Image (cartoon, rainbow, N blue to C red):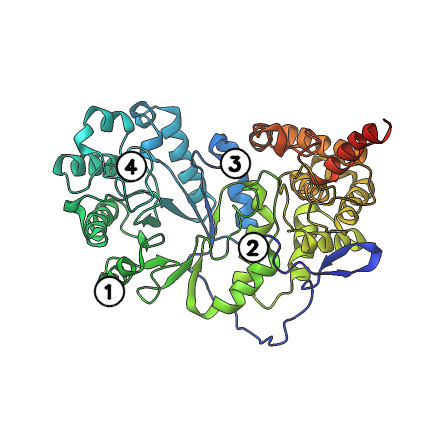
């Protein structure tokens, strides 16, 4: 997906960008604007994210306000993945629980609808360890820590004891999404067929939530199911009046919220390890093709690295007739503070980014890599923008884009910039992350040295080529 739609065309100033930037497809049609319910972003603050699970409340408030300014009317988050937490995290005065309540309150205080992502059958791992016969049977479904069999009466009561405390303790819940799996599920005979067990437990959970939050809308999701189970879930959801939406699938059952990997905006090419992977042409095309079938848009996000893609989703959800260059320039103006030629040139850079980065190693071929000859032009354009607009040094969004451009240059075996310049720029960007967004900076720094461009010369095409040719000179000298 990362390299899709990345043919290049020369633009003014020497920057090469995607051939799809600013260009309507041949079958372009005018698509009328419509209201989306909900429209926003799911900030997935679980243990697998790229730093946001470590944010203090003030940083959450900043992000919520930014999303509102981008056009979001709703924010989802994950207040308690029980299997990844301990009992003490859920005590009344526990810092973690107070933070989750504070996040929910901050969403409401911003005038936005608040949504939560909640697993169906997870409890605290320490409770599972104390009651091993409660443990869910692994097999067909994507499971994580602390999941118990919902057909075990004692385990089921433990599930709902925790959820009652969660629902009663959060100040506002407008949406609840609980997928059938990822995370969740049980493959035991008592739970078979699992789609029916899921709906039975989920209906009880929905009723419990609405006891405290009567306005809450319920979202089911069937991603990762086998097709026969998907059909079973679809059939029964049509008759389930307590469910309001489905997240992507099963289609034909309820109004659709575009949510997970349709389109992918956050895990694409590196999961944030190489900065953002802008996918504006893909996002635009996806919304144009699916627009009339979709009722809501809540893209799954795992960190600030996908900020430009989130912005694109929120813009295309409102107006899929915008070109890639339209949206890229809006981002450059509104979130980088650029004007005139600087905004135009950086918009072209955003439209051109998205090639593969960090593609591995090949200790025998000095030309391995992406062969993207335009990468260095984008790095130069961003360096020029920083020179002309010194305030960019304190804008983390700039450094995210710059780091991506650098990583794509390191993935190309040759270019017009020297290794030394790229190495220095990569280190400067990583230091800027630690200064401006330390949680993300620590995430990047935690990766193996081979994943950090400029730190390991032997695993990136640009510097490998130089290092390997240097080695071969010693053979020639003999």
Q: 193 or 120, which lies in front? A: 193
- Compared across the picture, whether 248 is left or right of 357 comes to left
- Compared across the picture, whether 191 is left or right of 289 comes to left
Which residue position holds label 2? Answer: 1
**First in sequence: mark 3 vs mark 1:** 3
Q: Residues within 10 Å of mark 3 (few under 14, many from 20)?
A: many
Residues under labels 1 and 2: Cα distance? Answer: 32 Å
Contact check, label 3 and label 1, Cβ < 8 Å: no
Please tell me the numbered disc located at residue 50.
3
**First in sequence: mark 3 vs mark 4:** 3
Q: Secondary structure at mark 1?
A: helix
Which residue position holds label 1? Answer: 235
Please tell me the numbered disc located at residue 166.
4
Residues under labels 3 and 4: Cα distance? Answer: 25 Å
**First in sequence: mark 1 vs mark 2:** 2
Q: 446 or 399, which lies in front? A: 446
Contact check, label 4 and label 1, Cβ < 8 Å: no
Can you give x and y, in whole percent of width and height, for residue 176 in the image?
Answer: 33, 48
Q: Nearer the viewer, mark 4 or mark 1?
A: 1
Q: Secondary structure at mark 3?
A: loop
Please tell me the numbered disc located at residue 306.
none
Can you give x and y, in whole percent of width and height, for residue 11 in the image?
Answer: 79, 60
What quarter of the picture does the C terminus occupy? top right
């Amino acid at each position: 997906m990362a390299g899709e739609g990345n043919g290049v065309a020369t633009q003014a100033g020497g920057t090469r960008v995607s051939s799809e930037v600013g260009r309507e497809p041949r079958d372009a049609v005018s698509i009328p604007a419509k209201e989306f319910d909900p429209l926003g972003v799911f900030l997935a603050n679980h243990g697998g994210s790229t730093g946001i699970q470590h944010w203090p409340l003030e940083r959450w408030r900043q992000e919520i306000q930014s999303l509102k300014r981008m056009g979001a009317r709703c924010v989802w988050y994950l207040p308690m993945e029980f299997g990844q937490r301990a009992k003490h995290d859920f005590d009344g005065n526990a810092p973690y629980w107070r933070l989750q309540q504070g996040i929910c309150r901050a969403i409401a205080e911003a005038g936005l609808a608040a949504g939560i992502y909640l697993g169906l059958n997870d409890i605290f791992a320490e409770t599972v360890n104390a009651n091993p016969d409660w443990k869910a049977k692994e097999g067909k479904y994507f499971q994580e820590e602390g999941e118990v069999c919902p057909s075990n009466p004692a385990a089921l009561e433990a599930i709902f004891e925790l959820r009652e405390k969660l629902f009663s303790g959060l100040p506002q819940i407008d949406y609840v999404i609980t997928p059938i799996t990822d995370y969740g599920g049980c493959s035991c005979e008592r739970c078979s067929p699992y789609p029916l067990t899921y709906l039975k437990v989920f209906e009880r959970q929905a009723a419990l939530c609405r006891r405290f939050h009567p306005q809450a809308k319920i979202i089911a999701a069937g991603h990762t199911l086998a097709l026969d189970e998907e059909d079973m879930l679809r059939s029964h959801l049509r008759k389930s009046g307590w469910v309001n939406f489905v997240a992507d699938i099963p289609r034909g059952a309820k109004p659709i919220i575009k949510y997970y990997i349709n389109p992918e905006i956050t895990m694409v090419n590196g999961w944030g390890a190489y900065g953002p992977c802008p996918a504006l042409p893909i996002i635009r095309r996806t919304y144009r093709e699916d627009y009339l079938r979709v009722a809501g848009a809540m893209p799954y996000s795992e960190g600030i690295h996908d900020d430009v893609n989130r912005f694109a989703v929120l813009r295309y959800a409102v107006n899929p007739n915008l070109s890639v260059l339209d949206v890229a320039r809006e981002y450059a103006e509104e979130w980088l503070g650029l004007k005139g030629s600087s905004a135009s040139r950086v918009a072209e850079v955003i439209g051109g980014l998205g090639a593969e980065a960090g593609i591995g190693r090949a200790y025998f071929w000095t030309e391995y890599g992406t062969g993207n000859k335009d990468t260095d032009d984008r790095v130069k354009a961003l360096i020029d923008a920083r020179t002309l607009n010194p305030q960019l040094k304190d804008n983390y969004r700039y450094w995210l884009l710059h780091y991506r451009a650098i990583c794509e240059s390191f993935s190309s075996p040759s270019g017009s910039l020297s290794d030394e310049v790229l190495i220095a720029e990569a280190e400067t960007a990583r230091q800027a992350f630690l200064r401006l967004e330390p949680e993300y900076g620590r995430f990047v720094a935690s990766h193996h040295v081979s994943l950090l461009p400029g730190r390991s010369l032997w695993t990136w095409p640009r510097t490998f080529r130089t290092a390997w040719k240097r080695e071969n000179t010693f053979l020639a000298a003999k």
